[in-house]
Image (cartoon, rainbow, N blue to C red):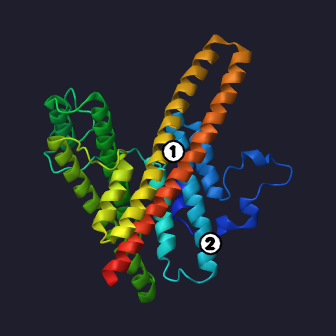
Amino acid sequence: MKLWCVVVVCLGVGVMGGKYSKEMNQAKPGGDEQTVEFRIAKLNQVWEKAQRMQLSPVRQSELHSDLKIQEKDELQWKKTKVEGLDENGEKEAQLRRNFNVILAKYGMDGKRDTRPLESNSLKDHETKQGDIFDDPRLDKLWNKAKNSGKFSNEEMLSLKREFQHHKDKTHEYNILMDTVSRTEESHKNVISPLEGDTKEHVLHQKHTELKQKMRDLNQGFERLRKLSHEGFTEDSEFREPRVIELWEAAKRANLTDDELDSLKEELHHFETKVEKHSHYQEQLELSHQKLRHVEALGDKEHIKKNQEKYNTISEKTREMGYKMKKHMQDLNNKISRQGLVHNEL
């Protein structure tokens, strides 16, 4: 098992050229083409390993969506490289970093996840009853909001989603920071001044990305603090944390009123997509529980029927997860591009 983890990690940090060969990425003649989930060999290896791990159905579905996004980005990068548009290797380094983040996020980077959730609070914080976010600052805010009496049951569910989203974002930041640190160590051995300049540029981009993510985390926490104290307002535009985060970023991006109105409409469509995906995730979990129950009873006909239903819901959840994450990626890029254009004017 340890050897397999090492192989996967090596794929993430090695040269990215060979995995795009025709022989590597097409099913072998006479083989079962249905088993080839991705067009890139290393992604298939990760997926095959994940199927042997004890991941929950929802988490496995999330991994599949992340790998599909990675596949799309790497195939686009292949075309870019052929056209000579990634001379300094910046995009290649970002793709490698994204892949390593996926490995770490799902526990496939060959190391135990001991990354703590960073906060400005004392490190000797002890877990108490009611501490559900593994972060003293979040737990303190959550307990205060829960005991304030100003939130309805529905609002408490929405608030919990916001807190969980912030916890996940913090965890992703810590994974990225750890990945960058390890990459930085590997870049210390440079062969030539030219190579050193290229690596320096790539590292600068990585640190810029980290700083932006830290700013986003700080702004997100401030929003949670304000929300916990003041409650939800009647004129709240959105409900889903990811959509709220995009809307807040758009309002900071110096966009025109027309651009904001257009983006707001698109975000409402995106929010519907997010909610629909969440609904399918819930149905996937319920279907999985029912399948386990039927399997325990041993009725083959019922097992087959529930397995087919589970497979259908699983496939639909993966498909919707990919479309949602791609749409979110497009929205992030749009907000960044439009904001950059206005800042340059």
Q: Which of the two residues, 310 or 206, is positioned nearer the viewer here?
A: 310
Callout 2 environment at 10 Å: few (<14), some (14 to 19), or many (20+)? some
Which amino acid, mark 2?
Answer: Lys
Residue 79 visible? The answer is yes
Callout 1 environment at 10 Å: few (<14), some (14 to 19), or many (20+)? some
Q: Where in the figure is residue 171, as x and y percent of width and height? A: 34, 49
Q: With respect to residue 240, does 22 lie above or below?
A: below
Residue beneath disc 2: 78
Residue 54 visible? The answer is no
Dot 1: what SS?
helix
In the image, farthest residue toward the right: 30
Q: Which of the two residues, 258 or 321, is positioned nearer the viewer here?
A: 258
Which amino acid, mark 1?
Answer: Glu
Q: Where in the figure is residue 112, as x and y percent of width and height? A: 40, 44
Q: How many marks?
A: 2
Q: Is residue 105 left or right of residue 83?
A: left
Tell me the residue at 44%/88% (across/down): 194
Residue beneath disc 1: 62
